[in-house]
Amino acid sequence: MTPKVTIVNVGYRSTNYWVVSAGSSRLLIDLGWPGTMGILRANLARMDVPINELRFGVATHYHIDHAGLAQELKSLGMPLLVLESQVTAIPLMKASTKPADHCVEISLQGNRTISFAESRGVLAEAGISGLVVPTPGHSDDSVSVVLDDGSAFTGDLTPLALADESSAVVLSESWRRLKEHGAAMLYPGHGPARAFPY
Ligand SMILES: [Zn+2]
């Protein structure tokens, strides 16, 4: 039987960074603002999450408030999971930063690039029952982590009420996919966790 996972938030500056733990095997979902490793380290320490227990890190999408510390975390030994739909978004993130952001460019080397179909097996390596699904809409590279207990980590997935004409079809498909995979509790990139709204 899989042990129950715990979920804590190590976020700051109005962005959530979620740590899913199966005992001392942990997954970090979303990866900090650029230039703020000290803050993330302090928050991880306060929540009793040793960096060397981060079995994997994954960004819900490659915007700077969600993936800003990816390369520094890799340098500290955290394997970065990159979903197949995210590969081309990684080089684009740097272009949207200013020198003052101190954003360390994410190397395409040393990442663990996987397909969505492989994600369940990879999370299982960390003792976590769930998978990663594509949930484009806010951005083409947006993904969500959905655990078998119904917890869904959705990043910046736009609520349907805020969808514009150009994104409505893609967004409703993303929300439908989450529901299909049993999403019951939403852990977004900003704002509090809440019940699945649809
Ligand atoms: Zn975003």
Image: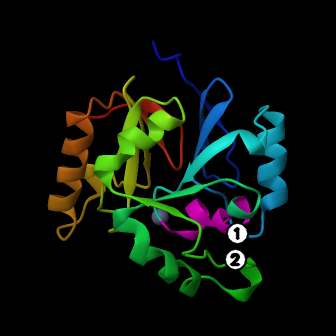
Residue stretch rendered in magenta on the structure: 62-73
Classify residue 171 as left or right of residue 156. Answer: left
The residue where tag 1 is placed is 34
Is residue 133 in view from this perspective? Answer: no
Check residue 69 for magenta coloring.
Answer: yes
SS label for mark 2:
loop
Residue at x 26% of width, y 51% of height: 161
Q: Is residue 78 above or below residue 194?
A: below
Q: Do the residues labelled 1 and 2 touch (CB within 8 Å)?
A: yes
Classify residue 135 as left or right of residue 46. Answer: left
Q: Position of residue 13 (x, y in %)?
A: 69, 55
**Closer to us: 4 or 150:** 4
Q: Where is residue 196 in the image (x, y as percent from the top left)?
A: 33, 32
Is residue 168 in view from this perspective? Answer: yes
The residue where tag 2 is placed is 103
- Which kind of residue does numbered mark 2 sit on? Cys
Classify residue 170 as left or right of residue 38. Answer: left
